[in-house]
Image (spheres, helix red, strand yellow):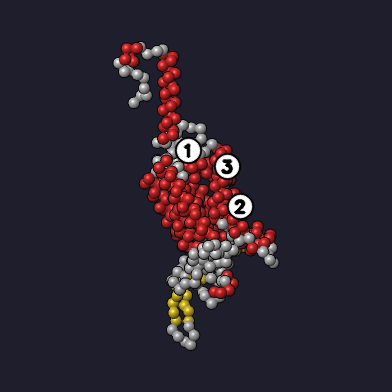
Amino acid sequence: MLTVSTVSTALGSPLVTLMSIPSPADGVWDLGPVPIRGYALSIILGIVLAIWIGERRWVARGGTAGEVSDLALWAVPFGLIGGRLYHVITDWELYFGEDRNPVTALYVWRGGLGVWGAIALGAFGVWLGARTKGIKLLPLLDALAPGVLVAQAVGRWGNWFNQELYGRPTDLPWGLEIDVAHRPAQYLDQATFHPAFLYECLWNLAAFAVIIWADRRFRLGHGRVVALYVMLYTLGRGWIENLRIDDVQMDDVLGLRLNVWTSIVLFVLAAVWFVWSARRYPGREEVVRTGEPQVDGDEDAAARTDEAGADDTDDTDGARGAQPAEDAEDGHRAGPTA
């Protein structure tokens, strides 16, 4: 929400009106002995929305209602652990460096969840849960991916509550106000900064809209929704990451932040998969469970079906007896039904 604050310059000069985005005075509210943290609320709300969106898309793809909620019991714990591990591994000096307390690596409520670790282990949890239910992984991930973008968009507001992960100083009207206690030492004389959390939130919501449109328009399947999700997210994350000024351990890996390199590599891999999948498996899966016959335009499945049909024909001919010679001479041979 934008507010108007007035700044009076020295020596009685005229008032200057500055538009800016305020930061919350406190990101924690005590409900009796229980602290309610804005960061945690943002993460939880994002997870709820991802499950709701994923459930609707999964049912539309042929899944059963309630399965996404069940799979969330696998994905969410793995995702939270993966997100924290990625953050701690890539910024280990914050917890294991000199005069640091390693126990604070467990303080998730203070912030610090690496999105790539969360996605990787979260997907692993989905895979484990899908195996127990006999669900094919790629159509399931295609159904879930757009909702994950919404979860990331909402979860970014946790950074706003914690006054963290903002960008360089700016005097733009939508500059984010940061309290002195949360500014790096070299920026103590700066009051407003790029709201990186808001940029990523809006980018993710726009990417969600693009994916939903593309999926309906082109009936994406075989992991192409996931690939498009990765491409769009990394495209935005790359330029937003370059705005950020928070101290990170790997802030200069061949001239770029580690997360920028990660985005570049994942974008390329996702693009390669998207193109390869579209050529190898055009169309969308109609069967979303293992052990069921494939009925889409998959070439391998069609070949297997033809072979099975040929075997059935041979067996039937054997039971019926040899075909008369005159039929063979006239060219009346058994074949697949048109």
How many angstroms separate mark 2 from mark 3 (CA)? Answer: 15 Å
Image-quadrant location for residue 38: bottom right
Tell me the residue at 47%/53% (across/down). 267
Tell me the residue at 31%/18% (across/down). 331
Count residues near mark 1 (Cα–Cα under 10 Å), then give few for <14, some for 14-19, many for 20+.
Answer: some
Judging depth in this view, the residue of 59 and 145 nearest the camera is 145
As drawn, the label of residue 128 is: 3
Label 3: element kind: helix
- The mark that comes first in sequence, 1 or 2, is 2
Judging depth in this view, the residue of 180 and 311 nearest the camera is 311
Judging depth in this view, the residue of 1 and 225 nearest the camera is 225
Identify the residue under disc 1.
288
As drawn, the label of residue 81 is: 2
Label 2: element kind: helix
Query: For this view, does 185 lie left or right of residue 1?
Result: right
State the image coordinates of residue 309 (x, y, percent, origin top left): 42, 25
> Which residue type carries mark 1?
Val
State the image coordinates of residue 33 (x, y, percent, origin top left): 66, 60
Q: CB atoms at circles 1 and 3 under 8 Å apart?
A: no
How many angstroms separate mark 1 from mark 3 (CA)? Answer: 16 Å
- The mark that comes first in sequence, 2 or 3, is 2
Identify whether 32 is placed above or below 13: above
- The mark that comes first in sequence, 1 or 3, is 3
